[in-house]
Amino acid sequence: MSASRTERLLNLLIALLNTRYGLRRSELREKIYHDPGSSDVSFGRMFERDKNDLRQFGFDVETVTDKGWGSDDPATTRYRIGKESNRLPDVSLTPEECTALILASQLWEQAALGSAALSAMRKLQATGELSSVAELPSGVQPRIKPPGQAFEDLVAAMHSQHPVSFRYLAGTTGKEEERLVEPWGLGSRFGQWYLVAFDRSRGAQRYFRLSRFTSAVTVLQKDSYTPPAGFSARAELDKLPELPLRTAVVDVREGRVLGLRKKAALAFDAGRADLAGQEPDRDGDLDTAPQAGTPDDGWDRLCVPYRDSEVLGEELASYGPNVVVVLPEELRDSVRRRLTAAVAFAATPVPPIEFPDDTAAKRTRKRTSEDQLQRMLQLVPFLVHNQGLHIREVADRFGVTRKELEDDLRILICSGLPEGYPDDLLDIQWEDDHVYITQDLDLNRPVRFTIDEACALLTGLEALNGLPELAEGSALESVTLKLMAAAGEEGLRAASLAGPEVSPGNSAHLQTARDAIESRRQLHLVYLSPQRDSFSERDIDPLRLYSLDNTWYLEAYCHSVEGLRNFRLDRIEKLSPNGRAATDHGEASEGFPVKLFTPNDDDTLVTVQLTRQAAGLAEDYYAERTAPLIEGGKDAGLLAEIRFGSTEWLPAFVAQHGGGVRILKPDDAAAAAGRWIEEALANYGG
């Protein structure tokens, strides 16, 4: 959409909103389009495209026909937009409901739904319904981290009702297969994200785990489907049984991989009987299984419980040559496949390493004219209800630069009714750097929620059910009902998405940390560091708690390293008050979301190549620069520059993502990763 088309659509919208009886196509052609030269057919196509665009922004164009005449006669057909049918209904919220809603809007981490949630909150703020006295739970910030680009593509296809295709590793056969499906719903269960879809090849509904996708998702834009009425992703996923508990036999180098040893159900000394992938009995005990050999000198044999070979395979691949899977064979295949893919990716030709001078640190979608028009439609009601804000504050609220905001305002003040008289134009002033609007032309109320906006807020509210601070009251339920009523049909379609419950796994550690945050007291902890493969004892000033799905973190000032650090609660062995008051050294990281990693200037700058599937790692690790890679006119991933405090764990990072990432620079780090992974692969026959 060009800038001129953006302005034309805005003028068309204002004209259709401000007519009681409707405007004929000839009037619109003369006063809005100024297009007397084109044929009736080409103008008709342009007008239909514009009507469809307005519908996508939430405005339904009504057709009014003169009595006794047919709607196929342009001379007797008029068009208008109802002022009430397209607007977001008033939503009156209590401070407690605002608290729940703010937490729900902040859940989505680095995803398209995160932008949709912010957009929905701006609409509510534009109505003046968000309470300024809402208080968030002390030190608690839950979040949902969707699983990469596949999630984004599937959500877009699901909401636009387009089929998709992808390659999938079948759990029953262990083979990769091409799938063509109609995506009906997405949801999280058992710590994994699943797609519920109709498989066209098999003619039946199927569940697909996103971690088993072995290719990028292709959206079939020219095809469409209709999902079943009343479909609920959560209800369908409730029917999905959890995978049975199984047992893996792995050999581990002596004194290494402490994290895996914690998970081991049983340790074996050399010469003892082995467990050959046997499942526990009803009492949860493991019986002796047939012999499968004994570990070599310098190795220990462990029995590790697991449910999903792909999940455990990813972890075991990250341990490289320090772990070898003995049984079962499908787990060996899972690890071998990742190591083989990493070696193969490293052997491909190195692309030119070039970064544009103005590369943003985050991989964001390029802003389009559609984004600009949507932003302007939110901007007018926002300014009406927030008169006199400083222009920089307005720009910050909308996530744009001051120049971008001023470009929006200049288009707005030139837009209005067809006659173009002063009173017929939007009147916005910002000469003194404070923005005022005195003429809004009935754009003073936000348009109703889009499907993405409704999904982001309603799914977020549903995910908060497991948070103790909110589950005790009725605010969560009441604000959900209010938003469902306000969202209307889009709220019903939001049932196609079901997020994970963000309940904490270790409630004792969580409560200990919360009490210390509120009382400003220090804590002493014993912590397992997977990167160093060792335990350490530290004294910390706890600052806040947050989560990614069901994984909870404690952000704290660590006195050992004299800086901010993030500790996973499930890696804390012991946590207790040390009797001292917290110091003034540390403050919680500003803004939201909090960073899991804090890059420093003296860290090693590493250049990596990411496939399209793994491109989200650039955001996860706060890449300083990125550059898109294009092959055959298609997206082929990213180049990214990322700072790492230690390069020792880079081989594990590469192996874990099995063919999704490789190190390009520094050369010695790339060579070390290659040698480490090849050594690991040699344990499986090369």
Image: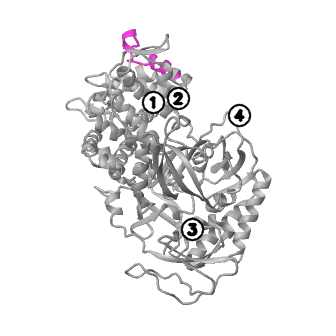
Q: Is residue 216 above or below residue 355?
A: below
Label drawn at residue 260: 3
Q: Which residue lies furthest to the left in this view?
A: 67
Task: Name which of mark 4 and mark 1 comes first in the sequence.
Answer: 4
**Quarter location, residue 628:** top right
Q: Is residue 668 magenta?
A: no
Q: Label 3: state its secondary structure.
A: helix
Give the distance between the C-alpha atoms of the residues marked 1 and 3, in whole angstroms: 49 Å
Of the two numbered discs 1 and 2 on the same chain, state the one appearing first in sequence. 1
For disc 4, the marked residue is 357
Q: Distance between the residues labelled 3 and 4?
A: 43 Å
Q: In this view, does 323 lie to the left or right of 572?
A: right
Type of amino acid under label 2: Val
Q: Which amino acid does label 1 sit on?
A: Arg
Residue carrying label 2 = 400
Mark number displayed over residue 375: 1
Q: Is residue 409 magenta?
A: yes
Label 4 packing within 10 angstroms: few (<14), some (14-19), many (20+): few
Circle 1: is it few (<14), some (14-19), or many (20+) Cα within 10 Å? Answer: some
Q: Which of 402 and 161 is in front in this view?
A: 402
